[in-house]
Image: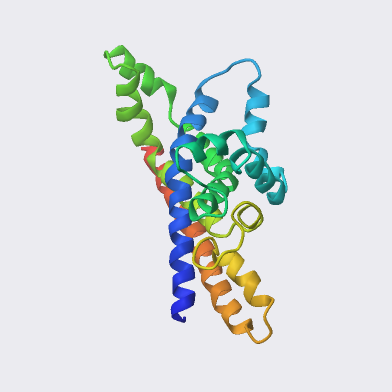
């Protein structure tokens, strides 16, 4: 791979990592609520949390522009604080994270739901408070599934296209991720080899993430069985 291609890969990995770093903790919290709580409107909340999974990515990017753009309600507040997301690396991470969030949420919810509530009840009976039970029982037992959620989210963020190009544009060195670089290369005659190399890395990353997530989930099932 050329130096420019390696820079694109490094930028893409950084954006995906930032997307997971912000999105996974939120997915774990939301997953715990959806797995352990029953409340009115739960179905609607669940649908809203998964909305980016079935909405066109371009629509998600447009909604981000409406919210985080220069004239958006959140964007104006951030701008007053000297923070700008649209057309930036941070904006690319936000768009990728929003698209990957439902996948992380589903994996986190399943991991937490697989933890036997009787174990939490037993810990409560021994005097453990909520936070003690969460950090000494629930999260350790759900850890393989939560790590798998992060891996899945990372792979999804790494390959995101529509929301990123809509909200963050396709700026070389700033927001041009793997998917956008492949798209750009395909628009230039004679750049098929570059597109193929980048696509090969993207494919290998996706397969690697899938195998790793399956291995982690299998490990989690074995731990639960013992």
**Which of 122/48 is in front?**
48
**Residue shown at 61%/71% (left/top)?**
182
| Extreme residue toward the bottom, this view | 190
Q: In the image, is residue 192 above or below residue 12?
A: below
Total marks placed: 0
Q: Is residue 193 above or below residue 153?
A: below
Nearer to us in this view, 69 or 36:
69
Model colouring:
rainbow
Given residues 6 and 133, the one toward you in this image is: 6
Residue 168, above or below 80 = below
- Quadrant of the image occupied by residue 144: top left
In the foreground, 73 or 48: 73
Q: Is residue 116 left or right of residue 158?
A: left
From the viewer's perspective, tell me whether residue 88 is left or right of residue 146: right
Residue drawn at the location 56% of the way across and 35% of the way down = 74
Q: Is residue 184 left or right of residue 206?
A: right
Q: Position of residue 41 (x, y in %)?
A: 66, 19
Using the rendered image of the protein, determine whether residue 214 is visible from the camera's viewpoint: no
Q: Residue 140 location in percent, x, y? A: 34, 35
Residue ID at (63%, 22%): 42
Q: Residue at x 69, y 46 (%)?
A: 62
Quarter of the figure with the C terminus: top left
Image x and y of residue 128, in percent: 28, 17
Q: Is residue 194 visible?
A: yes
* The quarter of the displayed image where residue 22 is located: top left
Q: Is residue 150 left or right of residue 134?
A: right
């Amino acid at each position: 791979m050329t130096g420019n291609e390696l820079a694109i890969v490094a930028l893409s990995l950084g954006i995906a990592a930032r997307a997971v770093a912000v999105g996974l903790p939120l997915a774990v919290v939301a997953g715990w609520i959806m797995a352990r709580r029953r409340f009115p409107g739960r179905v609607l909340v669940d649908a809203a949390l998964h909305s980016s999974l079935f909405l066109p990515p371009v629509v998600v990017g447009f909604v981000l522009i409406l919210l985080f753009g220069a004239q958006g309600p959140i964007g104006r507040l951030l701008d007053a604080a000297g923070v700008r997301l649209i057309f930036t690396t941070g904006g690319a991470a936000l768009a990728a994270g929003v698209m990957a969030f439902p996948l992380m949420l589903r994996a986190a919810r399943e991991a937490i739901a697989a933890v036997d509530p009787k174990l939490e009840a037993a810990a409560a009976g021994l005097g453990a408070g909520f936070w003690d039970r969460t950090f000494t029982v629930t999260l350790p037992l759900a850890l393989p599934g939560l790590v798998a959620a992060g891996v899945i989210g990372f792979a999804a963020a790494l390959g995101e296209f529509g929301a990123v190009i809509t909200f963050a544009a396709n700026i070389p060195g700033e927001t041009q991720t793997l998917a956008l670089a492949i798209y750009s290369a395909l628009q230039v005659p004679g750049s098929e080899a570059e597109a193929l190399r980048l696509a090969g890395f993207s494919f290998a990353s996706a397969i690697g993430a899938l195998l790793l997530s399956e291995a982690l989930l299998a490990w989690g099932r074995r731990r639960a069985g013992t």
